[in-house]
Amino acid sequence: MSMSETQRPAGRANRRARARLKAVAGFLLVVATTYLGLVAVTFFIGRVVPIDPVLAIVGDRAPARVVERVRLEMGLDLPYYQQFWLYLKGVLQGNFGTSVLTTNPVMTDIRRVFPATMELATVGTVIGAVIGIPLGVLAAVRRGSVADQVVRIVGLIGYSVPIFWLGLLALLVFYARLGWTSGPGRIDVVFEYTFTPITGFYLLDAILARDWAVFRDVLSHIILPASLLGYFSMAYVSRMTRSFMLNELGQEYIVAARAKGLSETRIIWGHALRNAAVPLVTVIALSYAGLLEGSVLTETVFAWPGLGLYITNSLQNADMNAVLGGTIVIGSVFIAINLLSDVLYRMLDPRTRTR
């Protein structure tokens, strides 16, 4: 083999390595830019809102010298670019300041309440995916039929009806009138001081502790708000599943599979849905991220002690450190899930790996 022939594979390998390095560098640049934009937006919101952070800490009746001293300690006398630099360094270190409402570090409060939001969003996403995918497949297979119209109408209602109205209606019917579920909150007072959570996910903690009485109680509390979030997730997932399935059912390989005599069940579930599952991963991930950031009203209606209720209470008490800290955490999780879904899409779809 000549020297030129041996150099060609090495040259191709170097080009592939440089392309991968360039892709990784671009990926990291997008992450850094997006996160910097998120921090910048929250910083300027904190400066624009008509709430004085100093008065929120010391009170309206504090002496002027105390107000001025606290303002200097917080660096609010500095130019905006210096304040932003200090704010950015604190955020990167996980320091969002101290909550006026709880007097705890904001990050400590977020670690305490965020598992409740994640558990609620996770159960809601599972409900939405388990129901939404089959409904979307049914609507695509029976396009134009009564079943298709019903699925589309149900999805449209999920997009249109205010979530707080459905939450209040669900509490009135299933809790107050029928008594099928437990009321607001996450766990009954009977178990609140005897049950010791391990991970912060009460359903999982109850299983690990083999405390089935607590498990039933927690499940009874979470099923109503999770079903409500699952309904909105189902509306999105079913609509996208229908769209993906219609695209797949029109492909040539479906015609070839039918010509070979394969059963319609195998064609739909074994071929069409399998190919549609790749973009569905991104859809479900985005739905999950949407439930994490959009559960504020649901948590408020059901008195669910998660991050949404924490931000709402903090906003009502002018606790801007807690509000901005919670906003950054939710935004960071949303960015992370979007990036993860993009990575999973590239891993599952071989066509994207050859580009």
Image (tube, rainbow, N blue to C red):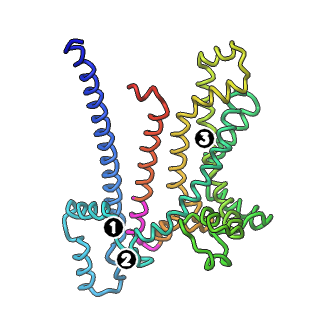
From this view, report whether residue 249 is shown above or below residue 127: above
Which mark, by number, is residue 56? 2
Q: Distance between the residues labelled 3 and 1?
A: 36 Å
Residue extending furthest toward the front: 1
Please tell me whether mark 1 or mark 2 is closer to you in this view.
Answer: 1
Q: How far apart are marks 1 and 2 (CA)?
A: 18 Å
Q: Nearer the viewer, residue 325 or 122?
A: 122
Q: Is residue 321 a member of the stretch shown in magenta?
A: yes
Circles 3 and 1: CB distance less than 8 Å? no
Going by the numbered disc 2, the residue's amino acid type is: Ala
Label 3 SS: helix
Circles 2 and 3: CB distance less than 8 Å? no
The 10 Å Cα crowd at callout 1, few under 14, some 14 to 19, many 20 or more, is: some
The residue depicted at 41 percent of the width and 72 percent of the height is 319
Say whether disc 2 or disc 3 marks the residue closer to the N-terminus.
2
From this view, report whether residue 34 is shown above or below residue 64: above
Say whether disc 1 or disc 2 marks the residue closer to the N-terminus.
2
Q: Is residue 267 visible?
A: yes
